[in-house]
Amino acid sequence: MRLNEYRIMWVLVFFDLPVVSETDRKVYTQFRKKLMKDGFDMFQFSIYVRHCMSHDQADLHIKRVKSFLPSKGKIGILRITDKQFGMMEIFEGKDPVDAKPPPQQLEMF
């Protein structure tokens, strides 16, 4: 099976969690650490992204994120194809920046 940019997925997790009390900050930190432990990289402070080689792998990571959702706050989970992710325009100020390349997958055949 040949991999293509429509089968390769990206999972994006957007969140806005309360950080008013000490307990809230602890929950926020634990949520971030669990995302990173599951292979997500910080795209922005409240946006984490993960590259997945298939739709099934994306489902697995979405299910895993749902298993450790905090009780407060607003969290969004979005799955997009590699093609859609590649069309994203990124800027630092007004200067366009190249997106981080996805991890390389070795193809045996």
Image: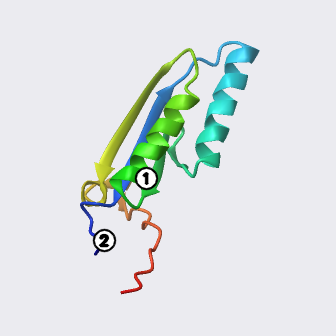
Q: Which residue is drawn at 44% across and 63% down?
A: 100
Front residue of 23/64: it is 64
> Which residue corresponds to mark 1?
57
Q: Which circle marks residue 100 in the picture?
A: none
Can residue 9 be spotted in the picture? yes
* Residue positioned 67% across, 17% down in the render: 24
Give the total number of marks visible in the rendering: 2
**Residue 76 in the figure: left or right of residue 64:** left
Q: Measuring from the top left, give residue 65's x and y in whole percent.
A: 52, 36
Taking the image as shown, residue 19 lies to the left or right of residue 10, namely right
Residue under numbered circle 2: 3
Which residue shows up at 68% across the image and 31% down it? 29
- As displayed, is residue 7 above or below residue 21? below
Question: Which tag, 1 or 2, sits closer to the chain's start?
Answer: 2
Q: Of the residues shown, which amino acid type is indicated by label 2?
A: Leu
The type of residue carrying mark 1 is Gln
